[in-house]
Structures are given as structure tokens and as C-alpha cells.
Amino acid sequence: MTRAALYARFSTDRQDPLTIDDQLRQCEEYCIKKGMTVVATIADEAISGATSKTRPGVQRLLDLVKGGKIDVIVCTSLDRLTRDPELNEKLLKVLPYHGVETHFTQRDGIMTPLESRLRAIVSAEQLDDVRVKTWQGQRGHHLRGKAVAGVAYGYKVTIQHDAKGDRIPGLREVDPEEAEVVRRIFKDYSLGESPRAIARALNEEKIPGPSGYEWRDTTIRGHKKRGTGILNNETYIGLRVWNRQKYLKNPETEKRNSRVNDSSVHETVEVPELRIVDQELWDRVKVKQSLRTKIVEETAGNKLTGNKRPAYIFSGLIECGPCGGPYAIMGENRYGCTNHRKDRGCDNGRSVMRSELEQRVNSAIPGALLTPALIEDIRANVARQVAAAAGQPGQDAKDLRARLRKVQKEIDNLMLAFKAGARSATMIEEMAKADKVKADLAAQIEKIKTGGDPSRAKVQVPVINPSMLRIAGQALADAAGDGSDHDSAREWREMARSMIQKIVVHPLKTRGVALEVHGRLAVMLAAVEAWNAEEARLQRSFLAEYVKLREKGKFVTAEDRIRFLQDMNVQIERRKRSFERFQLTVVAGAGFEPATFRL
């Protein structure tokens, strides 16, 4: 009697599919009709027919064929067995060699080789067509402001229905509890915490991660270019980006591999209602990521330590004067030349206590780096570079055109409402305002086209606050000796580290070492400018609070108002000494020569 193996497959890539049970029932009825004995029943569920190596059922089927245990394979149709022309060709050679036939219930018999080849090609084309249509559908869904992917951490699904009563897919809203965790992650990272430390702290506090799992450092760190991970999700600043990457099947392994798309094909839409992280905090995190990436690239030769957080304030910044090799902790909390210790041709055996080195460097920062002459030199350099940047209208014109498109869309929406009968005085006023904004933007774009860049008039050279220089210098001098772990102390230490480009250790003739410190001057200016912005922000905040309290009748007498203003000034002065919001961005980019001094 003929021995038959039944095979069924079910996947979501088929329209109007039969279930696996339906397929197997049809195959069993066919075997009874033809007088065959069923010796094996094999099924692959939720696996594409475009693969063979990753389908365990097909591999088992081939084992039965090669082992001579079956005479016939019974399927409902060819696309259940394969949609891959290459696998089809293999089956057309392997099965006859082992004397095995393939029967299809929908044909009530055997398919000719020619028809089999044609059907395999058509099935492969159908897969490509589905792939293209799926991509187009996702793109349209994204451009309409809807979410294409799953629910990201910090958000939840919004339930809304259309006029027909059907649920509208792809709607999201901010989850308040998870949003607070997102802000905490961004703040901790900006203060110098590593993703691993952040994940550990969240797990210790029993805060569930995405999908209820424990937090992992990779969940937070993600992949910057691919836009994955908490720190790289631009939805947190009100931007939804789609088409960052594509997937290609490896013909050898039959597994999908992702490829990062060029930024020119990314599709971005604004979703301001989904913003969780303010722009300032986002920018600080991006700067911190860039600095850490640079450190990793500079230390790429040591794969074991290249991506670790510095153990001490100046770890990784110290090098040997004679050989240029790294100085590292050698034992008993002393820095020494690693090339000398490993006998790599350096005779500098001089070491220095870590506490002594940190004290000498930090105490010298205010006097040696933050001098009026150097700051004035930086200011002049910044002025030249800002003025030069003002002569490049390309980006300004692009931003203006984007704003013009947005205003035009608002006008179109107002016109639709106007035609529908909504003709209130408020709407007419809004239309007049929008038309005026549109005219102003068009005029600015026209000026740029004719060579008159309106952004030139807005160029401002950073203002140096001398009093802040003394405060910053003293705080940085105290940073190394402060062993506390509160936010302010951690950020001051990060600031002190970022100001140092490198520390070169030179052995003296008799005993001890001389330290040659190279400083990043642009970062110093950024620190000073950050306080100017912070002071203005605090004053605006206090003014808003003053207006709010006055409306509530809290100020009965003039003394009440004076007391409030005095408290405001006290808090601003106190904030200067525990300044938590240093911007580590380089104000004018590259182009500054480092300051160097010897201790």
C-alpha cells in the first residue's frame, strides 16, 4: 500500500487561508479516496513559504523522503509546500530521485513540472506585491499621524471610533506614570549615570520595564542610528520617524537582516501632543551620547574597557610624557605608566597618588584656565564663527519653508471650516492672523533668495558673566574632593572632566612628576553661557509665580511683595552654587586651540 505523508502550512501572508486542521482533513480524505496509508502528519504554523531551511516541517519531510519511509507527499496546493522557485526546483530533482510523488488535493492529482515552476514564480511575485502594498499602507498611515509600530514605553493606546463605529487604529496618548520614568532616565543619563546603573536602580525599585519585563541597559541605550532604545526615541520630543531601516532576507541563512536607511528617506511627522521630554534635556542627552561615542572611538583598541564608565574623575585622560602611553591605576590608588609596567620600552617608572593628581589639577583649573585673557580670546573666536555661520542661509531658508507649509495647512483647515458654515468672528480673526504670518514668512524667504538673510540681524555674541567665572572655578575646584553622589555633585564632576582634554605626566629629574594639562576652552565658555540662560529662566519662573500669587490675593501689603522678591534673589544666589543644568555643548563647534599649563 502507498505510504503518504501529509503536510500543511498556515501563515498570515495568504489571503482567505484554510486553517491547518482544514488542510489536514482534506489531505486525509484524499488519502482515503486514493487508498493511501498515512504514516506521518507534518505542519508548519506561522512560517512563510518563502523559506525552507528555517521550516522544521519541510526539513523533517525531506528526511522522510531521503530515508525511503514515504512514497507520496500530500498537500492542498503548491503554495502550502513552497513559494520559493529555488526550493521548488530542488524538490523537482530530489523527489523523483527517491521515487516520491507530490499530490495536491485541489488538483486531485499530480502537477506537471512546467505548471509547478509557473505557480512557484507566481507565488513569489505575489509575496513581493504584498510586501510593496504593506509598505505603502504603512507609509500612508504614518503620514496621517498614526502609529505604525507597537506601543512604545511611555504611551498607551487611545480608544476612538469613526462614524461607522469601528475603532481607529494607531492612536496613542501619554501614559503619565511611564512618562515620569522616561524623564527620570533622561535626567539620570544627562547627569553621568550609565544605562546599566539606571537599569539596575529601576529594577531595585521594582519599576516594571517595557511589556512588564525587567529593565536592561540595552533597553535604555538602544541603537542610536536605528532610533531604538529609550534614549533615541524621538517620539519623546514630539517627532515620529518612520522608514529608518529595511529588512532583507539572507539567501544563505534565510533569516531577515536589518539595514539602516539613509536619513534622506526617513519620514518624519510632528506629534506635539506626545512630547514627554523637553528640548533642553533631550539636547543634553544627545551631547552626552556624542561624548561617550567619541571616548569609545578613541579607546577602540581595548574592547574590554572602551565603553566603560570612567572609574575616577580623570580616568582615560592621563598619558605618559616620554612614551605617550596611558597612565592607569597600578595598585594602592596610584597612577603609573602601563607601557613601563608591561615592559614595552618605556623607562618612566614614576607614579603619582590619584588623590594628589586630582587635587593638583582641580585646584589649578580656575587660575590657569578661566583667565580673562583666555576667555576674551574665546569670545572673539566665537564672534567670528557665529558671524560666519550667519552668512549661510540654507538651513534658515529650509526652516522658514517648513513653517510656511505648516501655516498654509492651518489656513486650508480654516477655509474648510469656513465653507462648512463655521463663520464666527473668532475664526475670521484667526484667518487674518494666519494670512499675516504667511506673508511675513514669504517675505523672509524672498529676502534670502535675493541675498538678504534676515537671520544676520539676530546674531548675538555670547555675553561673559565675570561673577559666574569665579563661582564656576571654585565649584570645579571642590568637585574632585566631594565624594557625595547627589545630582549637583555628579554634574560638576562631569563638567570638570569635560573641561580637560588630556593630562600628560612628566617625571622630574630628582623625584615627583610635573603635570601638563590641556583644557577644552569652548566647554568652559559653554558652562558660563549656560548660567546666563539659567538665570533668565529662573527670573521668568519667579515672575510667573508672582503674577499667580498676586491674582490669588496673597500680597496684602507692600512688605509681602518685597519679601517675595528678596526670597527670589536668595534662591537665585543659592542656585548659582549648586547649579544643576550646565550645558556641555560646545558653543561654536570646533576650531579652538586648547589651553595648556604645567603644574
Image (tube, rainbow, N blue to C red):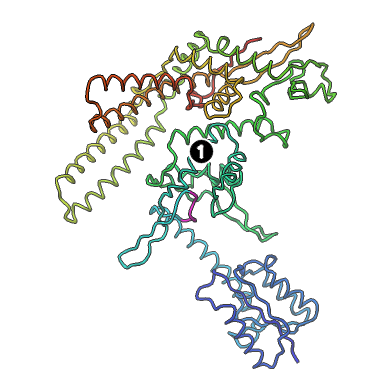
Q: Nearer the viewer, residue 360 or 55?
A: 360
Q: Indicate whether 40 appears above or below 227.
A: below
**Which residue is at 68% across, 13% downward?**
515
Q: Quadrant of the N terminus?
A: bottom right
Name the side, left or right, on which 195 lies relative to 149: right
Q: Nearer the viewer, residue 300 or 304?
A: 304
Name the side, left or right, on which 520 lies relative to 555: right
Residue 381 location in percent, x, y? 48, 16
- 366 falls in the magenta region: no
**Which residue is at 22% across, 25% downward?**
556
**Which residue is at 34% across, 36% downward?**
400
- 152 falls in the magenta region: yes
Q: Indicate whether 489 appears above or below 203.
A: above
**Which residue is at 49% across, 47% downward?**
265
Q: Indicate whether 363 appears above or below 11.
A: above
Residue on which disc 1 sits: 186
Q: Quadrant of the C terminus?
A: top right
Residue 435 location in percent, x, y? 22, 40
Residue 190 location in percent, x, y? 53, 33
Q: Which residues are magenta?
A: 148-153
Numbered disc 1: secondary structure: helix
Q: Indicate whether 255 appears above or below 512.
A: below
| Amino acid tagged 1 | Phe
The secondary structure that most of the magenta stretch takes on is loop
Name the side, left or right, on which 389 lies relative to 297: left
Q: Residues within 10 Å of mark 1 (few under 14, many from 20)?
A: many
